[in-house]
Image: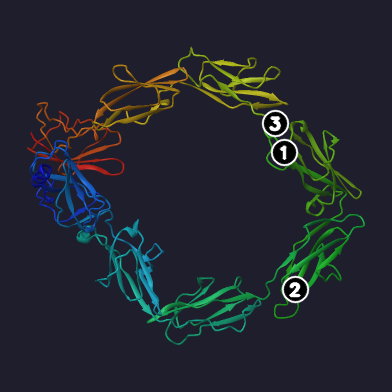
């Protein structure tokens, strides 16, 4: 019963946490409590007043200001501010900024305490918006990413169009107000589909704050019309011979419409009223193509017809089927042939520019050297005068043949470990020593034999040879036999590099001072080898199998193998550099009191951590720190030692001050901000005067403003500040300087 009574008494005397209410912003002159929060990147500071009733909360209590979702639900509440220094103050203000994803009309706030744990009364609902987009939207057809020409879109026969803004990122995360001819529509999404005529525009729906954003878009004039079914009447002919003409006629005429004719999608006439006929002239080069007509007019949709394709009836092709160059061997016949797309072809073969009597087929057998081609024409019809010549064929009767061999891929002596050689050209050599490339005709007709250093290579009788081992190094050539002809090639030198890896290693890659010796060795046997040690590409030793050095540089071992230099890997020896050791914490580390921070070092081979009394805290790469003070890291790289200092201080819990007294008494003369913002190279502190002129802009702010020489001509001058990092504003407000 006693326990029950005690519990009842405790409940009756529990703290009362009243609902928070909007309060005046003390940093803005002439301000009053807000009724809606319309925040942006240029302004985002709000205050709410909070009152509560006794008994007192516990000394470790914190009051937390929380924000609901846009519907007033606190299931996933957002923390706006937290104060632990108001546990004896029954009436105080919270200072907060709106999260950047805040958008809605019914946000609520509440305050809860942590010791004891009590949830206070919810506030009234308020419109709250973070206006992150505040410029006019641009709208057009969905997917076009452009305003349509003239800002107009025409719809035909009840068709519809989808409009959307295209100059805003993450468009689907906003709600919108769509308008047709000034009337607000019910659609709220990022796109609007319509089939009705009207002037359409859109703005982002920031609710109560919409007037602060200026996002109203351009207007799109949507008009409607009727399709007439424009087409080109089927012409009498679509395949024309040179000199012929053909009229193309639109199926709709005498209605006062405007006509534009197109060829291959490009306008070939200017828009002209009642211009419903276009004449295609086959005497004009390039008349062939796809023709269409486009009409427009009052109450009529802009409409383009299907295309009509006009072709050249005398336009056909002739293709040579045999190689460009042929060889006529003694008592041998070669056959020439062509193919054509002519519908009724007539053939006539020519030799050295003169027609060959009776050579009127698609093929021709030849036994004499010369230059041949076939002329093809149509048989009868209006285009019978048109003829097309084939490509020429050069037939030669050689006095001899010549073979040309080359490397099949890029080759450099003493770099490649394998290579292939092949015949790339077969030349027919005439009595006058002129050459004709007949590779396509005869490459597969020769019998081959490869030689190395003048001796036949057993089994190598094709036009290609693969060389894969250093024992095959030498000078290569090939001979070929065809009928009574014997041909030989040029010589190619092959010097492959042995497929071997030379590895070197060192006792250290860092030297602490010139007296330190570092030994570089290799596992390769150098007792009978020719070699040299190099530093920065210059030979420094050719006798010692192990190299002792005490200078920085890039070291390499080069061993001679089969007349080729074989280099090892590189070993880079560098002087000791403090930057080789790094930690994942700044030199001045700030942590909340009562917490532990683990700091980890890297770059060394061994580590020791000491406190200011030289006590060893850790002999691994990491140490856990929880007390203020000075610490020392002693890191070892091989035989070298690097010391790095680290200072730990507790996080300041006082708030950014908004009043200083620059009177030179040594008390509150400078604007001192918490160490979570000061002395930080990645935090930017900017101060403006009451005219908006920037008077201080510093990273790594040292709590040194104002300087002793700075004058304040007025009493109680007000300055404005912004504290930010690379991505966001951390704090902003005013500073009043009292003289």
In this rendering, is residue 588 above or below 310? above
**What secondary structure is marked by label 1?**
strand
In this rendering, is residue 454 above or below 103? above
> What label sits on residue 211 in the rendered view?
none
Question: Which of the two labelled residues, at mark 1 and mark 2, occupies the earlier sequence position?
Answer: 2
Question: Which of the two labelled residues, at mark 3 and mark 2, occupies the earlier sequence position?
Answer: 2
The residue lying toward the viewer, choosing from 381 and 335, is 335
Q: Disc 3 to disc 2, how far (Cα)?
A: 62 Å
Quarter assignment of residue 562: top right
Residue under numbered circle 1:
419
Q: Residue at x 77, y 69 (%)?
A: 375
Q: Residues within 10 Å of mark 1 (few under 14, many from 20)?
A: some
Question: Which of the two labelled residues, at mark 1 and mark 3, occupies the earlier sequence position?
Answer: 1
Residue under numbered circle 2:
377
Is 350 on the left-hand or right-hand side of 77?
right
Q: In the rendered image, which quarter contains the N terminus?
A: top left
Is 196 on the left-hand or right-hand side of 81?
right
Residue under numbered circle 3:
497
Mark 3 or 2, closer to the camera: 3
Q: Position of residue 404 (x, y in %)?
A: 78, 44
In this rendering, is residue 110 above or below 525? below
Quarter assignment of residue 367: bottom right
């Amino acid at each position: 019963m006693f326990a029950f009574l005690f519990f009842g008494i405790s409940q009756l005397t529990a703290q009362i946490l009243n609902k928070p209410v909007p309060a005046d912003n003390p940093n803005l002159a002439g301000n009053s409590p807000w009724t809606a929060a319309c925040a942006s990147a240029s302004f985002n500071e709000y205050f709410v007043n909070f009152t509560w009733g006794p008994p007192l909360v516990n000394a470790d209590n914190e009051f937390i200001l929380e924000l609901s979702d846009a519907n007033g639900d606190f299931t996933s509440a957002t923390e706006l501010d937290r104060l632990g220094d108001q546990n004896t103050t029954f009436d105080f203000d919270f200072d907060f900024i709106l999260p950047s994803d805040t958008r809605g009309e019914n946000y609520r706030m509440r305050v809860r305490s942590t010791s004891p744990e009590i949830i206070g009364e919810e506030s009234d609902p308020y419109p709250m918006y973070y206006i992150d987009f505040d410029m006019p939207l641009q709208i057009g057809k969905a997917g076009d990413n452009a305003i349509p020409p003239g800002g107009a879109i025409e719809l035909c026969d009840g068709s519809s169009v989808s409009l959307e803004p295209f100059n805003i990122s993450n468009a689907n995360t906003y709600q919108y107000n769509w308008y047709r001819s000034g009337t607000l529509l019910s659609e709220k999404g990022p796109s609007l589909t319509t089939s009705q005529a009207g002037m359409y525009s859109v703005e982002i729906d920031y609710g109560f704050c919409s007037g602060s954003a200026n996002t109203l878009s351009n207007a799109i004039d949507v008009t409607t019309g009727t399709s007439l079914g424009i087409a080109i009447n089927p012409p009498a002919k679509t395949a024309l011979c040179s000199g012929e003409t053909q009229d193309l006629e639109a199926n709709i005429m005498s209605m006062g419409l405007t006509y534009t004719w197109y060829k291959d999608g490009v306008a070939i006439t200017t828009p002209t009223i009642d211009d419903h006929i276009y004449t295609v002239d086959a005497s004009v080069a390039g008349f062939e193509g796809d023709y269409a007509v486009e009409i427009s007019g009052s109450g009529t949709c802009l409409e383009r017809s299907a295309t009509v394709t006009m072709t050249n009836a005398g336009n056909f092709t002739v293709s040579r089927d045999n190689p460009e160059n042929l060889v006529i061997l003694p008592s041998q016949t070669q056959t020439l042939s062509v193919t054509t797309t002519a519908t009724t072809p007539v053939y006539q073969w020519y030799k050295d520019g003169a027609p060959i009597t009776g050579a009127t087929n698609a093929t021709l057998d030849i036994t004499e050297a010369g230059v041949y081609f076939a002329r093809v024409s149509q048989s009868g019809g209006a285009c019978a005068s048109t003829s097309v010549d084939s490509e020429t064929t050069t037939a030669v009767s050689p006095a001899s043949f010549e073979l040309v061999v080359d490397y099949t891929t890029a080759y450099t002596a003493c770099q490649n470990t394998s290579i292939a050689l092949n015949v790339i050209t077969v030349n027919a050599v005439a009595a006058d020593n002129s050459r004709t490339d007949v590779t396509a005709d005869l490459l597969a007709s020769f019998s081959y034999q490869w030689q190395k250093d003048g001796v036949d290579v057993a089994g190598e009788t094709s036009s290609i040879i693969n060389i894969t081992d250093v024992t095959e190094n030498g000078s290569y050539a090939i001979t070929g036999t065809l009928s009574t002809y014997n041909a030989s090639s040029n010589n190619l030198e092959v010097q492959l590099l042995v497929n071997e890896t030379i590895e070197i290693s060192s006792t250290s890659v860092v030297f602490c001072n010139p007296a330190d010796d570092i030994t570089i060795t290799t596992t390769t046997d150098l007792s009978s080898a020719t070699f040299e040690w190099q530093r920065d590409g210059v030979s420094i030793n050719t006798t010692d199998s192990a190299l002792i050095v005490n200078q920085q540089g890039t070291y390499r071992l080069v061993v001679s193998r089969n007349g080729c230099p074989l280099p090892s890997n590189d070993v880079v020896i560098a002087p000791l550099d403090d930057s080789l050791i790094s930690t994942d914490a700044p030199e001045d580390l700030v942590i909340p009191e009562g917490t532990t921070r683990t700091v980890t070092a890297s770059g060394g081979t061994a580590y020791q951590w000491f406190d200011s009394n030289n006590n060893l805290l850790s002999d691994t790469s990491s140490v856990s720190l929880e007390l203020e003070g000075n610490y020392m890291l002693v890191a070892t790289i091989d035989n070298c030692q690097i010391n790095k200092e680290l200072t730990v201080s507790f996080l300041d819990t006082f708030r950014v001050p908004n009043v200083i007294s620059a009177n030179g008494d040594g008390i509150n003369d400078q604007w001192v901000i918490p160490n979570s913002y000061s002395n930080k190279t990645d935090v930017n502190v900017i101060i403006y005067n009451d005219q908006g002129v920037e008077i201080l802009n510093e990273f790594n702010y040292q709590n040194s403003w104002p300087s002793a020489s700075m004058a304040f001509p007025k009493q109680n001058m007000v300055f404005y500040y912004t504290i930010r990092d690379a991505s966001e504003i951390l704090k902003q407000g005013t500073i009043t300087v009292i003289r």
